[in-house]
Image (tube, rainbow, N blue to C red):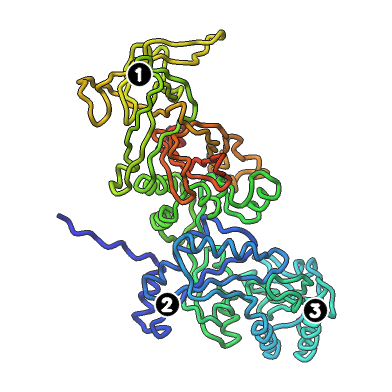
Amino acid sequence: MAEATEKPLNFIEQIIEDDLAAGKNDGRVLTRFPPEPNGYLHIGHAKSICLNFGVAQKYGGKTNLRFDDTNPVTEETEYVESIKADVKWLGFDWAEELYASDYFDQLYEFALKLIKKGLAYVDDSTSEEMAAMKGTPTVAGINSPYRERTIEENLDLFVRMKNGEFAEGTRVLRAKINMASTNMLMRDPIIYRIKFATHHRTGDKWCIYPMYDFAHGQSDSIEQITHSICTLEFVPHRELYDWCIESLEIFPSKQYEFARLNLSYAITSKRKLLQLVNENFVTGWDDPRMPTISGMRRRGYTPEAIREFCDRIGIAKRDNLIDVSLLEFCVREHLNKVATRVMAVLDPIKVVITNYPEGQIEELTAENNPEDHESGSRIMPFSREILIEKEDFMENPTKKYFRLGPGLMVRLKHAYIIKCDDIVKDENGEIIELHCSYIENSRSGNDTSGINVKGTIHWVSEAQAVDAEVRLYDRLFKVEDPSREDGDFKEYLNPESLQVITAKVEPALKNATLDTPYQFLRKGYFCLDPDSTADALVFNKTVGLKDTWAKEAGK
């Protein structure tokens, strides 16, 4: 038997192992997950969470949860709470809960230090003037007329900015670096701006706020983060990250970049997701069609499946589009192990078993999960009148059709073999009822009939069946990469992403719980929605039993 090989290290793990071997940071590994609280987390953040917390756990380190809350206009406590809930739901816990706003006093002192070193200046130029002076990637920028202000004048103006003496947009603090740099971000970037806005934590204490690029690296340094892991769009920012740390002579945190997660048939732009919410294209951030962690949780995805998905796609240095089918596969694979099996008829037609005693109700036993024999069993009522799926009957069956048809036999799951004897139609010729007979000694688990049938279908007893609203969710977009299409991304929304039906479900589901996944036999995986009440059940379709999209695409 071949020995199992260890999974190769990703490049982040290799960096950490090299640092540990070299004795860097006294053998410490401290990462951080630093979301801006301006929206709900999505599947891309899940990858970052799994990476930051995962590598720290692997090497005996810790991870801070830090909210980079430097923009009071877009940030809300609601988002802070949702982010904390999502991280915990994914199965991780943080060493410390921190905020960039915790460091506003320290960051202000850092800005003063840069001014005193002649490395920052107050600029009175308008945003349009600064843009014009910025140059292009091939043409050097032009120095601001305010670039050579004295240290004393800059200190005076910056303190007055802090004291609220100037209007928004009239002055900014810029780092004095190099207006001819090939990296446009190094051409005297803005590091502080005036903003008269109430902050969700500091209230009205401040009217100047650090820019993200200034706050981020210094926050890492203050916390003595050893490995600051970002997505690839921050590669150009690394030079500024290092310049600030070196100029301030503070703890040298190091930034490393990996490819962000781009998922097919989805968008992961917070701005666009917020647009979908605000314009009512979805019901909220936790709409089960959204790629948000809260949306996936409401849809019935499990944290184990999402962690497995993030592990499977790995950590790369190049952006690529990940097929959502892989995520659905991971969800399906985990749910198959843990979901409780139940029967639900989504498009019912009535079957009368004419030779079954009227008024008799038989209690049948069904195993909750054949993948887990410790999961127990449940009682299902069986009676003369049952409901089956319309698609499980064909009036003119094809040669390889093994379900119910005139004169054909089929097994009812956990119950008996039945044979179709007659069809009842309405005045329009629509089939409204089937009359069947059952083979008395063919009960599942005790079948002595000697009859072999190739088809097995699900059913519910009509009298005991419970109505349930079932929300059949599909992909939110009808194109693979909506963010790259021309025009308004909303033009590519899938008009069939939600279908709502009333189904008939077995009575055991009256006791359904929010934390229990279910497999509706032969139909897919479902979960109870928070909209449910004791008198009105609501189920969400999580994922089908098979990848129907791949089949439709001819893959």
Image depth: mark 2 or mark 1 in front: 1
Is residue 188 among what the camera can see?
no
Mark 2 or mark 1, earlier in chain: 2
Locate residue 123, reporting x and y percent: 78, 78
| Figure check: 3 above or below 265 | below
Image depth: mark 3 or mark 2 in front: 2
Pointers 2 and 1 in contact (CB under 8 A)?
no
Query: Element under label 2?
Result: loop
* Spatial separation of the CA atoms under disc 3 and disc 1: 96 Å
Q: Amino acid at mark 1?
A: Tyr
* Quarter of the figure with the N terminus: bottom left
Is residue 437 among what the camera can see?
yes
Residue 19 is left or right of residue 65, and the answer is left
* Spatial separation of the CA atoms under disc 2 and disc 1: 70 Å
* Quarter of the figure with the C terminus: top left
Q: Which image quarter: residue 359?
A: top left
Q: Amino acid at mark 2?
A: Val
Locate residue 342, reporting x and y percent: 40, 38
Look at mark 1 in the image and give the residue it sits on.
Answer: 356
Look at mark 3 in the image and give the residue it sits on.
Answer: 145
Locate residue 551, reporting x and y percent: 43, 33
Look at mark 2 in the image and give the residue it sits on.
Answer: 29
Q: How many residues crowd around disc 2 within 10 Å: few (fewer than 14), some, or many (20 or more)?
A: many
Of residues 134 and 553, the one nearer the viewer is 553
